[in-house]
Structure formats: structure tokens, C-alpha cells
Amino acid sequence: MSAGENSLLIGDAESDSPCIGVCSTLFDEICIGCGRTVQEVSNWVFLSPAEKKIVWERIQFEGTAMRFQTKI
């Protein structure tokens, strides 16, 4: 990712979070919106930049979250 870019499709330069506001972690172990685990979502503010980078790389590689789905 380049500076100011948070995802392949959605994101802004002001936030380092992959959240797109479609949270399902009350019901799912993996959020359908961003692809993070319940633990990653709840502890995001406590993760180091290196830990956040690892999460970003995994969710981008998996590409299953809504944030990575293309609209036709």
C-alpha cells in the first residue's frame, strides 16, 4: 500500500482501519465488512503499525470481505 491508501477499493488517508462500517462481529468470528477477526477489531487501537500491516496484508490476500468486492 502506498501512503494515504488503505485498501484496494475503499479507504481514506485519515484512517488506518479497514473498517467500512458494516460490522458483523456481534454474530460472526470474522467481520463480513472488513475481514478482521473479533479480536483484531476489538484490539485495533492497541496494535502496533507492524501488527496492523500484517492484518491488512492478510485481509487483502484473502479478498473475501465486502471492502474488497467489486461492484458491477
Image (cartoon, helix red, strand yellow):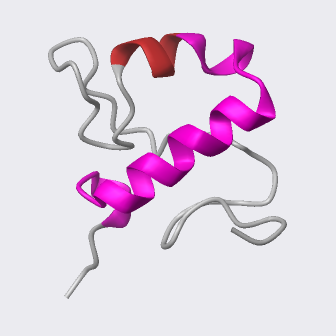
Count of numbered circles on the image: 0
- Residue, x 15% and y 15% (percent of image)? 27
Q: Answer with the quarter of the image where residue 31 lies.
A: top left
Q: Nearer the viewer, residue 29 or 20?
A: 29
Image x and y of residue 60, in percent? 43, 59
- Outermost residue toward the bottom in this view: 72
Q: Height in image: 57 above or below 32?
A: below
- Tell me which residue sits at (48%, 72%) in the image: 9
Q: Quadrant of the N terminus?
A: bottom right
Question: Is residue 55 visible in the rendered structure shown here?
Answer: yes
Direction from residue 60 to residue 27 in the image, left or right: left
Q: Residue at x 84, y 67 (%)?
A: 3
Residue 6 painted magenta: no
Residue 57 lies within the magenta run:
yes
Q: Quadrant of residue 13?
A: bottom right
Image coordinates of residue 40 in percent, x first then y, are 48, 20
The answer to whether residue 18 is seen in the rendering is no
Rendering coords of residue 52 (x, y %)? 65, 35
Up/down of 11 relative to 19, above or below:
below
Q: Main secondary structure of the magenta part?
A: helix
Q: Quadrant of the C terminus?
A: bottom left
The residue located at (33%, 29%) in the rendering is 23
Q: Which residues are magenta?
A: 43-68
Q: Residue 69 appears at what percent x and percent y?
A: 27, 68
